[in-house]
Every structure is written in C-alpha cells, then in structure tokens.
Image: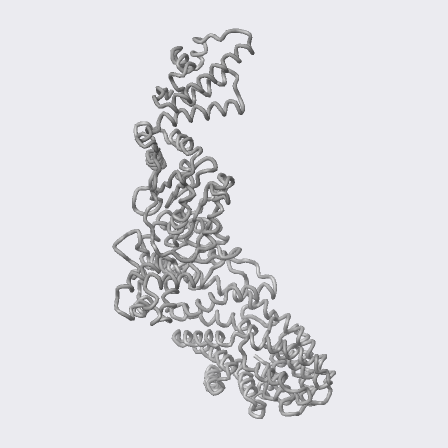
C-alpha cells in the first residue's frame, strides 16, 4: 500500500494538509450527491485498508499510496481532470517527503555530473544547431522538444557531440546536469534503469532510503522531482528505448540527450524525440581534427600523407584520434610511416589498437557486432567480400544466396549503424567497418569467404550480361539472351541497363580486379569485362576501359585460357587506341591475330581485322587500314552473316571516304545502312550515318549531310554514346558552317566541346580551334578522325 508518514519539513506538511483538505471536500461532495453520510468503515473495507488508515489519509497524517488514492477517488466519484490533479498533488507530497532537507545555506542539491570531455572538437556545426532547437529563445528549454537522440556507428563521436553541446548549454539548466553511462555496448554488464534512477534521484536530493525499489515508482518520482526544474540529462551509450524511457523528464523545463549506436525508433515515435544521425566527419573537419591533435606544423611537412591518413581513417573521429596519438609523439615523418603501415598491413585494425578497450577500434566495433542476431551477423561478415564503395539490396541477396531482398536483415544492420542506407535500395559502410567485416570472415571457416565471393561474382555477372543485352539487343549472345539471376531486380530496357551500369561501375571494376587475383575465379574477370565493354565505350570511360580489359587479359593468361586471352587482348587494343597508344595497340592486335590463327578462330581473325582498321584509321593511315577492311568484308561475305557483312561494309566505306572516294564510300555505306536497319542495330546505323554525312559533305552537298548527322545525333542520344554524340554535333556544325550559318555552327560546336571536355578527350582541341577561328577560315575535320569503337 506504500503508506508512509509525512516528513516534518514545512513544504511536505503544507502539501499534505492541502491534499487532506481536498480529499475531505471530495467526501462531502460525494455525501451531498448521494444524500447520505458515507460509512467510513465500509469505505475502508472497499479500499482494502483499515479504518484508521482511511482516517489518517483524510486528516493528513498519512500519505496514501498511488493505487489506494486512485481507488478512493473512484469510490468518491472523482474523475477526469480533477482526479489527475489530485494524483499529481499526491506525487508532489511524496517527492517532498523523499527529498533531503535543505542545507544550512538554504540550498537544495544541484548536480554537476558532466564528465571531462576532449578539448579538441571540430565540425558538427549543423548538428549543434539542431540540438539548440531544444532551447527556446527566451532562455529556457523549448516546450515542444524534451528529448534528443544522437545516433551513429561506433567511434563516430556521439558522446563528444552530446557533451560538447551540454557544456555549451549548461548555463540554460541552472538546476543541474545529470550524466550516466548506460553501458549499452561492450563487455561490461548493461546498466538497468533502476540503477540509473537510483543515482539520479540521490543526485537530486532524494535520501537513499527513500528511493523506491520499484523502477516504475522510481521513474514516477524522478518525473515529479524534475517538475518545475530545468535540469539537463545526458544518457550515454543506450542500447534500447526500454533502457532509456524510465529516465526521461515528462514535460518542458528539463531536457534529455541520449546517445546510442542503435536506432531508437521508439523514442522518435512515442516521445517525439529529435533524431540526429551522425555520419563520419566531412573531409575538412577530419583534416582539422588531425591537425589540432597532431600539430598543424608537423602535418604541413607531409600534406599528401596527411590527406591519405584522413582517408585511411575513413574520417572516423575515434580512428583519427588514435592515429593522432600515434604520430604526435613520434619523430618527424611519422604520418608517412603510419600511412605505409596502414596501406600494406594485413590487419590494419591492429594499428588502431590500444590498451584501453573503450578506444580500441576493433573492440569498439565488436560491441555492436556481438549484439546482432546470427543471420544479420552473417550478412555483415559477408559484406567484407564486397570490394565496391556501396552495394544494392539485390547484390546483398546474391551475396547470401537468397532469392528475395534481405530487407529485414539490412534494417537490423542499419538500426545498429553498421551499414548506412545511402539511397533507396543502396547501402554503404565505411572502410574501417569493411575491414572489420573482412577480418571476421578471415577468422571464420575459409569456405564462407570463398562461397560468398563466388555468389557475389555470379550475381554481378548474371545481371551485367542482362544489362548488356539491353544495351545491344541486336547482338547475338552465346547461348541465347541471358536470364536473370536468382536475386534480380528487373532491368527492363536500355535506360534501366545504363542506370544499373552507372551505379555499379565502381563495384564492377573492383570485382574484376578481385576475380583476376583469386585462383579459380579468373573466368569471372574476363566475362565481367566483356559484359561492361559496351557501356564503358559509350560512356567515354577510356582509362577505365583499358584498365578493365588489361585485368581480364592477365586473368585469362594466368588461367591458361588462350581463347579468352585473345578476346581480352583485342578488347584491350581497342581501348588503347582510344587513348592514342597506337604502337601498343598494333602490337597487341598482331599478337592476337597470330593467336586466333593458331586456334583456328576465323571469327576472331575477322574481329581483329576490324580492330586493325580502327587503329590505322584513328592514326590517319587509311591506306593501311583499307586492306584489312577488305579482308574483313570478304570473310563476312563467305559466312553470309548479315551483321558481320554490315560491319565489313562500314569499315570499307569509312576508309574510302577518308581517301576521298566519296561516291564509292556512299555505295558501301548505303548497303550497310540497309542491313543495320533490317537488324534493328541502332549503334551501326548511328555510326554509318556519320560516315554518309562526311561523304555527302565531300561531294559538296552539306544540306544532305545535315540530314544524316541529325538522325545519327538522335540515335546517339538514345544509346547514351556521348563520344559519338560529340562528333555528330561537331560535324553538324561543320555542315552548317559550309552553308554560311556561322551562329548555328558555333552553337553546335560549343555543345560538342562541352561533351569532349566532360570526357577529357583530346578531340576537344580541334573543336576549340574552330571556335577561335573566324567563320571564313573554318576548316573541316581532318580525315584521320575516328568515330568507331
């Protein structure tokens, strides 16, 4: 029944007399309403208390328990706001009884519990401003926000932010600041709310013996004691909403700031808490933190190494602080030494280890990982297989061998801030967490990493082949059109395919490198490279294109697959020719020509001939290109393959046009255009139309040329071929200039220049020259220009 005698303190007495008077009036009102005198003994029996206890409640000598009071008010017919007011008054009497008497100076307890925080704090300006929302402009806490939750991954600086703001705002909380480490993560036993409540209530002046043993009663007492006060509560390292909720103030005046590595959605939904989700530091702030802890003068001697150290620390504040501690007392040049160690170490996290568990990076990460359910822990470990900067939900399904997106598992990982939802359906984790996941894999059974990597490669290869098929649906695929992987998000057209390649290209490049370096997985390297080839060409990524095919070639050589090596070598040569590395490209193509002959690969020989045409054409030597074009055409005529025939005709037409034989070139080009149109081959049509336009211009018919260029331009934009789009715009400008339309010509050249500059392509130079020259001095594109793959 929780009956307690009232304290002798004046406040308690006054409140007790007020409560007793209110209860007596309620009895009188009940008697008037019923028209009879209430039998006090009968009423006590219904309340399950003694008659003497009831008399003590009504005369103010004893405080009724909360439950007894509720029952009494019900019996007396007191409901609604009036009942609530009396219940609050009863809690105030209880709080007054439990508080320690005032000191000899008349002051009640004012706790100052904020712990010492690091003197170096950088960045987080936006987050600090958001926390200031908890304060009103008048000087007290705002009425509409009582709780803020600072969330984020381990080591991201949640406590540092909360304490920095708390110190900055402490003058706005004159009745004290409370702090507790709830020990939600790590090896220590998690703190239960009752323990935290006991400490808070004592700090606020409640006598130790007067703290209720029941956590719910203690929570109610805390809210009562805080009523009318302005106290700041910092609840650090909370694991769950349930651990925090009993410690929260109930109304404006006091404010709680909670930090957690978990997403505390319950506080947002039920308590309307302000959520502040911390990410790693911006680059400028990460560099500033390193400078302030290490010494700006020292880092100024190693600026590049300092920038790399920021990246190797993933801009994670804890990692930056540990790195700074390692270098601050070391000899000059220690930043570069640490960078080398981190770059080449088999276990880089060892270098972020310390004897103090609370700042040892691996131990800190483990505190979050250890709380995961097994399926989510498995997905987190397997993310260590993924070498790209981000991963989509369907790749996660492929990674764990699931047919459906593992949305629930990803929600668990994002709620624990071990991964971050980068955009709809796409996730990322910073490099140090990726290293930790990879370490967990290394420490487990070897087959987990091997099987996870192969599942991931298989998913990406299946999806890349499907996307590639949508980019060139007219090109026959070996074994027919590729089907979807088990974990597959629909790619239903060219735009979706291009979007997928754009989003996944960094991951695809990294996976080609991973497969090329892993014995037994090399075939994935050249197959992925083949699947990416069209997109790399159309998007103008010349350097990446060469790098991917070089990896594929090396992988095929190590795997001992001569046919795959020949194809990869030819693709590498095509890529090098786009980089103006003509000598290397020719050497590789002649090597491939010999390899295809040795293998008896006639189709391979024909493809190499076409590549030789492109290389010789790009370096302005159509006379050496033409024989190879004729041989490729002759081989196609023997096979009667319409696509091969169209490619051969195009190749011959291009060389005749470059040699000034425009009428012959047009005859071949028209045959090629007919075949491409019949096949639905948009790429081929776009390319041959540019050739036809150049031939028409060579015959003095710029108006006819414009028609061909405009159709090619439309097709290039549909295909997303930025390189050829730039050339179509340039030639269109040439044709308008030939007709005396200088303003239209300049506008078209400016668009072409913007595209070439965006591709960092050297052809920008010749367009820039046209824009500088007077219209009368314009000269056409030299015959050596190359627009084919």
Res. 491 in view? yes
Q: Is residue 212 above or below residue 526?
A: above
Q: Is residue 44 above or below residue 97?
A: above
Q: Quadrant of the N terminus?
A: top left
Quadrant in the picture for residue 682: bottom right
Q: Position of residue 177 (x, y in %)?
A: 37, 41
Pick whichever, 298 or 612, lies toward us: 298
Q: Residue at x 50, y 64 (%)?
A: 504
Where, by quadrant of the figure, is residue 721 drawn? bottom right
What x and y, as percent, mark residue 302?
Answer: 34, 71
Query: Looking at the figure, which quarter contains the C terminus?
Result: bottom right
Position of residue 783 measured from the top left corner of the image (x, y, whole percent): 61, 89
Of the pair 463 and 72, the residue shown nearer to us: 72
Q: Is residue 672 visible?
A: no
Which residue is drawn at the image coordinates 31% and 68% (left, top)? 335
Q: Residue furthest front?
A: 105
Name the one closer to the observer, 48 or 78. Answer: 78
**Total marks in image:** 0
Residue 84 is left or right of residue 778, and the answer is: left
**How has the structure been colored for display?**
one colour
Hey, which quadrant is residue 56 in on the image? Answer: top left
Relative to 441, 783 lies left or right: right
Q: Compared with residue 211, is residue 527 higher up or lower down, i.e. above or below?
A: below
User: Is 663 placed above or below 136 here?
Assistant: below
Where residue 175 appears, x then y in whole percent? Answer: 39, 38
Question: 415 or 65: which is nearer to us?
Answer: 65
């Amino acid at each position: 029944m929780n009956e307690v005698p009232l304290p002798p303190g004046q406040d308690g007495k006054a409140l007790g007399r007020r409560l007793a008077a209110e209860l007596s009036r309620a009895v009188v009102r009940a008697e008037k309403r019923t028209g009879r005198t209430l039998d006090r003994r009968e009423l006590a029996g219904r309340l399950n208390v003694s008659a003497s206890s009831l008399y003590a409640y009504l005369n103010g000598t004893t405080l009724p328990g909360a439950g007894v009071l509720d029952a009494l008010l019900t019996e007396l017919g007191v409901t609604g706001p009036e009942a609530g007011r009396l219940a609050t008054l009863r809690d105030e009497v209880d709080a007054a009884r439990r508080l320690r008497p005032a000191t000899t100076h008349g002051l009640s307890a004012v706790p100052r519990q904020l712990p010492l925080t690091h003197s170096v704090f950088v960045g987080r300006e936006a987050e600090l401003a958001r926390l200031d929302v908890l304060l009103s402009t008048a000087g007290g806490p705002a009425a509409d926000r009582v709780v803020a939750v600072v969330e984020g991954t381990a080591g991201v600086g949640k406590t540092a932010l909360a304490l920095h703001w708390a110190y900055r705002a402490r003058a706005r909380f004159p009745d004290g600041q409370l702090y507790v480490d709830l020990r939600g993560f790590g090896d220590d036993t998690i703190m239960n709310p009752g323990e935290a409540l006991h400490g808070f209530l004592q700090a606020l002046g409640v006598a130790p013996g007067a703290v209720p043993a029941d956590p719910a009663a203690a929570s109610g007492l805390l809210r009562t004691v805080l009523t009318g006060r302005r106290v700041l509560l910092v609840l650090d390292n909370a694991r769950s909403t349930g651990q925090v909720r009993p410690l929260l103030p109930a109304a404006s005046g006091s404010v709680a700031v909670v930090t957690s590595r978990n997403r505390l959605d319950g506080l947002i939904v039920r308590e309307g808490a302000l959520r502040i989700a911390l990410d790693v530091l911006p680059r400028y702030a990460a560099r500033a933190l390193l400078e302030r802890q290490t010494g700006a003068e020292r880092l100024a001697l190693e600026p590049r190494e300092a920038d790399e150290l920021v990246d190797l620390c993933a801009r994670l504040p804890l990692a930056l602080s540990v790195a700074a501690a390692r270098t601050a007392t070391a000899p000059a040049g220690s930043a570069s030494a640490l960078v080398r160690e981190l770059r080449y170490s088999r276990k880089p996290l060892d270098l972020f280890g310390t004897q103090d568990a609370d700042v040892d990076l691996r131990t800190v990460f483990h505190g979050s990982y250890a709380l995961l359910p097994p399926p989510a822990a498995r997905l987190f470990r397997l993310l260590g297989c993924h070498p790209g900067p981000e991963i989509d939900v369907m790749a996660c399904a492929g990674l764990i061998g699931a047919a459906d997106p593992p949305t629930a598992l990803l929600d668990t990982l994002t709620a624990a801030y071990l991964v971050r939802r980068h955009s709809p359906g796409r996730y990322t984790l910073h490099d140090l967490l990726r290293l930790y996941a990879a370490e967990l894999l290394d420490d487990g059974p070897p087959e987990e990493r091997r099987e996870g990597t192969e599942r991931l490669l298989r998913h990406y290869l299946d999806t890349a082949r499907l996307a590639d098929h949508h980019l060139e649906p007219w090109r026959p695929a070996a074994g027919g059109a590729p089907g979807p992987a088990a974990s597959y998000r629909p790619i239903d057209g060219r735009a979706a395919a291009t979007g997928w390649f754009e989003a996944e290209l960094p991951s695809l490049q990294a996976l080609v490198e991973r497969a090329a370096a892993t014995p037994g997985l090399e075939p994935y390297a050249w197959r992925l490279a083949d699947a990416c080839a069209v997109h790399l060409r159309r998007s103008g990524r010349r350097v990446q294109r060469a790098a991917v095919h070089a990896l594929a070639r090396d992988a095929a050589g190590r795997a001992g697959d001569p046919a795959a090596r020949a194809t990869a070598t030819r693709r590498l040569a095509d890529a090098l020719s786009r980089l103006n590395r003509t000598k290397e490209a020719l050497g590789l193509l002649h090597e491939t020509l010999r390899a295809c002959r040795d293998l008896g690969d006639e189709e391979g020989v024909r493809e190499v001939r076409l590549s030789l045409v492109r290389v010789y054409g790009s370096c302005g030597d159509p006379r050496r290109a033409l024989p190879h074009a004729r041989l490729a055409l002759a081989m196609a005529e023997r096979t009667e393959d319409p696509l091969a025939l169209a490619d051969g005709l195009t190749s011959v037409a291009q060389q005749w046009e470059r040699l000034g034989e425009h009428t012959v070139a047009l005859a071949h080009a028209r045959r090629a255009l007919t075949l491409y149109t019949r096949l639905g081959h948009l790429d081929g049509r776009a390319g041959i139309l540019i050739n036809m336009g150049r031939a028409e211009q060579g015959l003095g018919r710029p108006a006819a040329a414009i028609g061909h260029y405009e159709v090619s331009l439309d097709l290039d934009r549909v295909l997303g071929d930025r390189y050829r789009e730039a050339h179509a715009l340039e030639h269109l400008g040439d044709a308008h200039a030939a007709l005396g339309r200088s303003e239209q010509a300049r506008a078209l050249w400016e668009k072409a220049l913007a595209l070439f500059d965006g591709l960092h392509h050297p052809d920008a130079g010749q367009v820039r020259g046209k824009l500088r020259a007077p219209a009368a001095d314009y000269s056409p594109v030299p015959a050596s220009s190359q627009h084919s793959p």
